Image: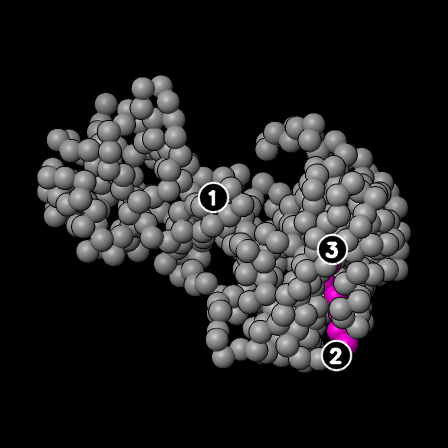
Amino acid sequence: MIERTERVPIPANVVQAARESARAVRAAVKRKGGTPLRDGNLVTLLYHGVADAVRFHHWLDIFPAVPDFRPVAGTKLWWTQFEIPPDARIEYKISVERNARRRLVVDRFNMNIAPNPWGANSILTGREYLEPPWAQFDPGVPQGAIISEVLGTDLDAAPRIARIYTPPTGTRYPLLVVHDGSDYLDFAGLATVLDNLIAAGDIPPVAAVLSDPVDRFGEYRGSDAHAAYLVDTLIPAASRHADVNGLVAMGASLGGVASLHAAWSNPGVFDGLILQAGSFVVELGGPHHRGVLFKPVIRFMEKFLSDPRELPPRIHLSCGLYDGLVDDNRRLADQLSHAATSIGHSEVASGHDWHAWRDLLRPGLMHTLGSPGVEDEGR
């Protein structure tokens, strides 16, 4: 058997430090700028610790296999090397196996971290990837306000609290109805994105009502009760704080399904849809092993595709290239393109995560809200 060796050697000072102590190796890697260590598109990741096996763990459905980490003889240092597309952005953890137990940990040598609803992941980017400037906080940009509204609802016994973003300028504006609104706010920087795009003139001033489910699976897989809640309770509540001129529903994953279902259930109510990595599954099984969780979605999609009813005039779909839902979204975009509505479609080299959806917000917002003379330019 031929031993696999590094295409690019691990820096000698890092190997020497690994022979000394954990503190020494951390300092040596830090002096190199942390991981990943780069050579063009080739990246090197490191782990230091006692283990039986170390692996690169990601949540990408469509991505080449990554070699397992290999130990450096005489040390507790492990390494792996692989090529990453130059424009890619990947979230990952390191899987550490020891004594038949497995744990997932963030990469301690990589300071690039993405918080998410379940904790945080490490981030690996290609050498050409840049965080969109319109997603970065700028203290010089006027900021919108966020207020809270307590809502009574027939969906559950307890009242719900919805947060409402109002823009810094304007008096009459469209309203975004945002599924998983708090996650969009906390993990995709939605308020910052809206502030920046409004200030740049890419979109008109827009308000947003940030809706959070209590039972996400029950509400977001084609629930008539949820669609009625949006129109009868949530939107009227938001309208007390904003002079609404147009409605756009948006959501990611199952939130995309909920958005499409809301528009289908209420023909003529919504003026636009922003559907991000929508779980538009039409059959169980397949290469991504869709289970019974998707049965209600499949029932709704069958109804929708057989009778789309009156579609909103502007719809934008988007997805990550490494997301197993990318083909479902491409198929739906193609099916909708034959309808009398304006369809936009964007993709980025990423997976099924909040930063991927953040990076796709600008084309979706511009397509559905638009401003005179502004083109849908993608990311």
Q: Amino acid at mark 1?
A: Gly
Q: Which numbered dot is residue 150? A: 3
Q: Is residue 108 above or below residue 266?
A: above
Image point (24%, 29%), residue name: 50
Q: Tell me the mark number nearer the camera, choosing from 2 and 3.
A: 3
Tell me the residue that label 2 is attached to: 171
Q: Is residue 262 in view from this perspective?
A: no
Mark 2 secondary-structure assignment: loop
Q: Position of residue 248 (x, y in %)?
A: 75, 62
Image point (28%, 47%), residue name: 109
Magenta highlight range: 171-177
Mark 1 secondary-structure assignment: strand
Q: Are marks 2 and 1 in contact (CB under 8 Å)?
A: no
Mark 1 or mark 3: name the one nearer the start of the chain.
1
* 134 sits to left or right of 316: left
Q: Position of residue 230 (x, y in %)?
A: 80, 53
How would you classify the magenta stretch by its main secondary structure? strand
For the residues labelled 1 and 3, the Cα–Cα distance comes to: 27 Å
For the residues labelled 2 and 3, the Cα–Cα distance comes to: 23 Å
* 94 sits to left or right of 277: left
